[in-house]
Amino acid sequence: MNDSREREWLDAMRRRLEERRVELERLRQQTLRLLSAEGASQADEGTVASHPADAATDVTMAEIEQSVLRTIEEELHEVDAALERLANGTYGYCSDCGRPIERARLEVMPWAARCLSDQERFERELERRRR
């Protein structure tokens, strides 16, 4: 690919990453507001809930929202890291093996840091550690 087309492609990836970052930050703030509002509502009531089933629901919802927040923050971190790689000229190269990441993979997931084979190996290793 010639330099001009490469620059255009990288600029398009940068725009996509920046747009995703804005969206993730919006979702993050929305989730934080929701968690804060639930905490304030429970504080206003003086208890978590007046019935054990309500208490269980409140706890479950808070856990789900915390999980959603963690997922958003993890992706936000990955997007920021991809923007850093764009800035320092390492975008599109696998962080493990150094080979180019498949363009099709980056088109689907612009924040990908690993080629597909290294990502699969990384995920297998994570799963193995969890057992």
Image (cartoon, grey):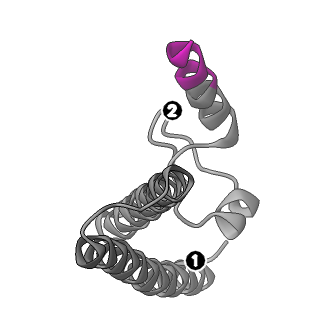
Query: Which three-letter amino acid code belongs to the residue tagged 1?
Result: Glu
Image quadrant containing the C terminus? top right
Q: Give the magenta part as a residue range.
A: 124-131
Q: Quadrant of residue 1?
A: bottom right
* Numbered circle sitting on residue 97: 2
| Residue under label 1 | 6
Query: Which three-letter amino acid code belongs to the residue tagged 2?
Result: Cys
Question: Element under label 1?
Answer: helix
Q: Position of residue 50 (x, y in %)?
A: 42, 62
- Residue at position x 43%, y 66% in the image: 79
**Is residue 48 magenta-colored?**
no
- Residue at position x 37%, y 74% in the image: 38
Q: Mainly helix, strand or loop, the magenta region?
A: helix
Q: Position of residue 47 (x, y in %)?
A: 29, 63
Please state which of residues 126 and 66 is positioned toward the viewer in this rendering. 66
Name the N-terminal-most of marks 1 and 2. Answer: 1
Question: Element under label 2?
Answer: loop
Query: How crowded is the residue under tag 1: few (<14 C-alpha within 10 Å), some, or many (20+)?
Result: few
Answer with left or right where residue 93 lies relative to residue 103. left
